Amino acid sequence: MTTPQFCDVLIIGGGVAGLSLALRVAEQAKVTILTKGALTEGASLYAQGGVAAVLNGREDSFESHIQDTLKAGAGLCSPKTVEFVVRHGPEAIRWLIDRGVPFSREETASDTEYHLTREGGHSHRRVIHAADATGRAVETTLEALVRKHPNIRLQENYISIDLITQQKIERAGPNRCLGAYALNKATGHIHVFGARFVALATGGASRAYLYSSNPDTSTGDGIAMAWRAGCRVANMEFVQFHPTCLYHPRAKSFLISEALRGEGAKLKLPNGAPFMPDHDARAELAPRDIVARAIDYEMKRRGLDYVHLDISHKPAEFIRSHFPTIYERCREYGYDITREPIPVVPAAHYTCGGVMTDLSARTDLEHLYAVGECAFTGLHGANRLASNSLLECLVFAQAAAENILSALPTADPAVKNLPAWDESRVTDADEQVVVSHNWDELRRGMWDYVGIVRTSKRLQRAQHRVDLLKEEVREYYTNFKVTNDLIELRNLLLVAELIIRSALARKESRGLHFTRDYPNTLPGTPQDTVLTPALFQDSAVRAKA
């Protein structure tokens, strides 16, 4: 039996949101970070474009950024949340600069300033970046600070299984989050982590789809765990498909940044003809949902496997200096982007819905917070504006930290006698092929039936398949010891069900959700799709009382 571990703040996830939160609370609290792989394996590392914030007050304004965000969100953004995030944007950037993040600079007539680029949906240049590898620059800078901080304990290669709550372990008193069970992937042992506060920073769920720009770790773990703990989720139907991922059999999930289109790259058919002006007056600078649907339409109409993204008309030195990562990666696959176009396809990229929170990142469950892509804050609405994601991570990490630190002096101590994980009635799995087969079937079904363009019949077919797979996995989970793949599959199936149920509930097309059965946007004030666990709960937990 493993020895339980206790801390003030348990953070599940090691991306920009989790690391920012850890650093902000660690001066006054003992922190443990759980990451299910190496610290830098999450989606944050792969964010290319940058962070959107109003940093040039001469040409830009808070109101402009707010309006761009609201417009991209197709009527479903929370104005209060949008204003909160946008106005805290410059402060968040200054916090990163103070910690040494090497953002790109440019020489001007009078000074050296930070270079700002423009992306789709933005009316001004306001995206601060580190060349075309902003996520890597931010993540590695924060990682170095976390690794040497005396109050932060880093536990890598631990995948969280479920949250521990007062109600789940049948303890008297108000329900609150007490910690989490996590599998040590190196030893196979399951550990108990108790904490006064728990924060989910686990990222999104784009790996529910066959094609995704996200790393393999993006399996919706935080959303699923929060749901099983009794938290509401919202707007799960809004899955953002990035329009341009490299099409190559060996390029597993390489994203071609939207910043290329911001700097003049054109989308073209194989014959060289541009097509975006036929779909939207903003052409390549239209929001991602419009661009993704346009590419999907042209591919299906013409029977294409991909379309082209061409920036070769720009000077070669400009391309190499602004997009060094993309240039080098494409060269590895045989494409010289200074001379020829890049074959691209859309891929699942970002989960706009998630665990419902307030402006302090608090969820429905006392002492449980959610930050980053796993959270639903109201910022993104029906479609996320480019480069608002890292901004949301930073602003809500600060908000969560302030709330936790204010509550820390009077918060209950971490419960010391939490029950161990119960493996007394399970054995080692006899057929791992069940897990791998079901994983493949789920991802293909979601891609075919719950993709960029949907119909009610497709969604119903997807729901039927998910129901069958969930029953198989439930039986498997009950009888065999848990593994990393089983935990991820269990979470993905639950998140897939939440996406499908949300999509079936929305009888209109709006933002990222486009259905042929309801192609128009409903008039009047749109409503968020809110799902409540009490209506269909799967909260099985294995713990010794």
Image: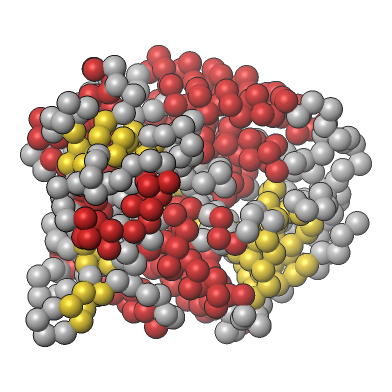
How many numbered markers are drawn?
Answer: 0
Q: Residue at x 17, y 26 (%)?
A: 271
Q: Residue at x 37, y 75 (%)?
A: 102
Question: Horizontal placement of 448 versus 284: left or right?
Answer: right
Residue 304 visible in image: yes
Q: How is the image coloured?
A: secondary structure
Q: From this view, report whether residue 20 is shown above or below residue 159.
A: below
In the rendered image, residue 3, in percent from the top left (x then y), is placed at 86, 64
The image quadrant of residue 269 is top left
Q: From this view, report whether residue 71 is shown above or below residue 107.
A: above
The image quadrant of residue 318 is bottom left
Q: Residue at x 31, y 35 (%)?
A: 343
Question: Horizontal placement of 373 versus 104: left or right?
Answer: right
In the rendered image, residue 488, in percent from the top left (x then y), is placed at 63, 40
Q: Residue at x 21, y 42 (%)?
A: 310
| Quadrant housing the N terminus | bottom right
Question: Horizontal placement of 457 versus 150: left or right?
Answer: left
Residue 507 visible in image: no
Q: Nearer the viewer, residue 506 or 94?
A: 94
In the rendered image, residue 540, in percent from the top left (x then y), is placed at 72, 39
Question: Horizontal placement of 475 versus 279: left or right?
Answer: right
In the rendered image, residue 203, in percent from the top left (x then y), is placed at 50, 52
